[in-house]
Amino acid sequence: EPEVTQTPSHQVTQMGQEVILRCVPISNHLYFYWYRQILGQKVEFLVSFYNNEISEKSEIFDDQFSVERPDGSNFTLKIRSTKLEDSAMYFCASNDQGGAYEQYFGPGTRLTVT
Amino acid sequence: QKEVEQNSGPLSVPEGAIASLNCTYSDRGSQSFFWYRQYSGKSPELIMFIYSNGDKEDGRFTAQLNKASQYVSLLIRDSQPSDSATYLCAVGRTPGGSRLTFGEGTQLTVNP
């Protein structure tokens, strides 16, 4: 069964450093999403992406964040200058219908900012 | 008021019993409703989705939706210890958006 994959599984970085989290969505999906979950808190939407454009973003997704589809398979989330409060699990998701239809999540990247 | 509110847990049921998980939402424009299961340290796994009022059954799982009451529930019949997890309710507003808004989750423990 096709699934979303994410790398790395765990990333440790120092405050102020740039990080890039990578995702390979399900192959026939065209709509991509990033969510995050701070430890012990709920899953929060960050951004949705389709046709090389951001479709929707949340208040969390400020200028420190960017997304990119650098090639035909990868989807990335970049955090330009990490803060301690960026420490969280970051989940990539994808679907084939767009909109708020069924979204399938990857295993996540645990980001630890020290 | 929280956008998506789930019954506070933890919920504990004996093996073989029915587990009932509830969720209310505040946005009347919500059109899509999901139940995700999340094991500790893992990612959300989609187990049910429902878009129309009424019941939807899939194996041991039944999702129920009442848009007038802004209420969605998940019943798990014949609960198994492997069902022990946190269950996340998520709602979406489609068309008109792509984000899913999640509740804080209800932790379910099924005791052998």
Image (spheres, coloured by chain):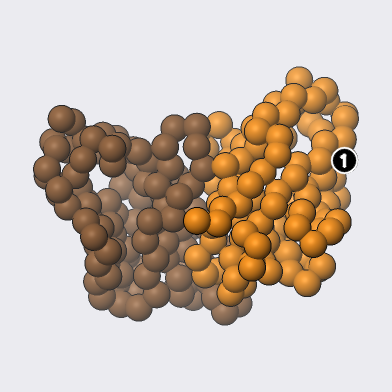
Q: Chain B takes which shade in the image?
A: brown
Q: Nearer the viewer, residue B59 or B76?
A: B59
Tell me if residue B86 comes above or below residue A11 in the rendering: below
Q: Say which quarter of the image contains residue A100.
A: bottom right
Residue B28 position, x and y percent, is 45, 73
Quadrant containing the C terminus of chain B in the rendered view: top left
Does the image show residue B2?
no
Q: Could you say whether the residue bearing mark 1 is in a helix, strand or loop?
A: loop
Residue A21 position, x and y percent, is 76, 42
The residue labelled by disc 1 is: A80
Residue B55 position, x and y percent, is 24, 71
Q: Residue furthest front?
A: A1
Q: Residue at x 27, y 51 (%)?
A: B21
Q: Residue at x 51, y 42 (%)?
A: B43
Q: Residue at x 52, y 70 (%)?
A: A101
Chain assigned orange: A
Does the image show residue B72?
yes
Q: Which amino acid does the dot numbered 1 rest on?
A: Arg
